[in-house]
Amino acid sequence: MDRKSARALLEKPLAELIALADKTRKDFVGDRIELCNIMNAKSGLCVEDCKFCAQSRRYKTGINTYPLKSVDEMLAAAFSAKEMGAERFDIVTSGNRLSSDELKRIADAISLIRDRVRINICASLGKLSEKELLLLKKAGLGRYHHNIETSPRYFSTITTTHTFKDRLDTIKAAKAVGLEVCSGGIIGLGESWDDRIEMAFILRNLDITSVPINILVPIKGTPLDMRPSLAAIDALKTIALFRIILQGKIIKVAAGRESVLKDFQAMAFMAGANGMLIGGYLTIKGRSVDEDRLFIEEVKKAWKA
């Protein structure tokens, strides 16, 4: 499939598009849902200017800020992730660079989590070199998360303190040392359908393992705080397009699924999604774990119906 063919899919009725995406999901990935839990291990005071982000110190968003948490706190959070049913635990830090001391602490935490919790470990730590990523891999990291956020054309509209190439360089470095990569972005930033399609094709060409799709939740104090919410139908179309384009990759619904999709959350999984975050997000509270467990069971029943 090329970009022109993908664009033509948008002309199909929604039900037909979703049916095609659901068939693609069945053919390429089956009925498994990957569940992830993330830990905000270092919050706020970021020097970057990403217009959607509550953690930039350029904006007054009122979030809690704190330095990198201890190894024991990261270990405890990993145990909690496993107890709630997550198969992957992701250590996330604010900012685009870590100090050598911070990186070593995270490597130590990863090593302990690998040995004591036995959960798949991910990390989202900003821009890292091959040497830094190799340190984490040797400690037990299996997958590195680094979103491209949007298309190259639209990227400078939402971020000016680093480039789209910076993002690609870190992704390529992670793949070079043998790590899986999780990379997606945010829809509803004001981008066009062509931007979303371009983003999907870039992720396909990078051979990304897992693709999280976040839906913008406008946060008070950020430059996008007055941005109208994306329509649920457009979110579902985007998920369906990503499934059809990316075929056998993990398509993960993340932030915004509760506030934008609302009663249509299950439709995201009929539209091709096969993964989700549980236990909340970085600065936004999600649904309870019990609610999500029941939701997952209902989705699996619907898939088998």
Image: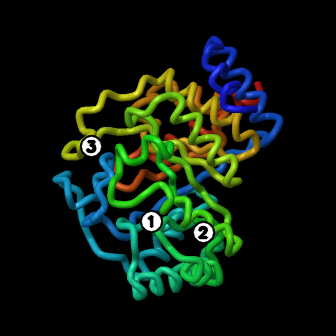
Badge 1 element:
strand
Q: Nearer the viewer, residue 299 or 171?
A: 171
Q: Earlier in the sequence, mark 2 or mark 1?
A: 1
Q: In the image, residue 125 lies at what x, y percent?
A: 46, 69
Identify the residue under disc 1.
92
Check contact, mark 3 vs mark 2: CB within 8 A: no
Viewer-side label of 3, 2: 3
Q: What separation in Å lies between label 3 and label 2 (alpha carbons)?
A: 29 Å
Instruction: Give the residue type at disc 3.
Output: Ile
User: Which residue is depicted at the point 68% across and 75% down?
Assistant: 177
Mark 2 secondary-structure assignment: strand
* Above-or-below relation of 151 to 57: above
Residue type marked 1? Val
- Image quadrant for the N terminus? top right
Residue 221 visible in the snapshot: yes
Residue 216: x percent and y percent?
A: 39, 39
Residue 121's disc number: 2
**N-terminal of the two: label 3 or label 2?**
2
Q: Nearer the viewer, residue 34 or 20?
A: 20
What is the CA distance from the residue labelled 2 to the residue labelled 1? 11 Å
Q: Which kind of residue does numbered mark 2 sit on?
A: Ile
Residue 36 lies, in percent from the top left, at: 57, 55
Name the residue rendered at 31%, 27% in the picture: 228
Among the 4 quarters of the image, the one containing residue 301:
top right
Q: Which residue is mark 3?
A: 219
Quadrant where the C terminus sits is top right
Q: How is the image coloured?
A: rainbow
Q: Residue at x 81, y 40 (%)?
A: 28
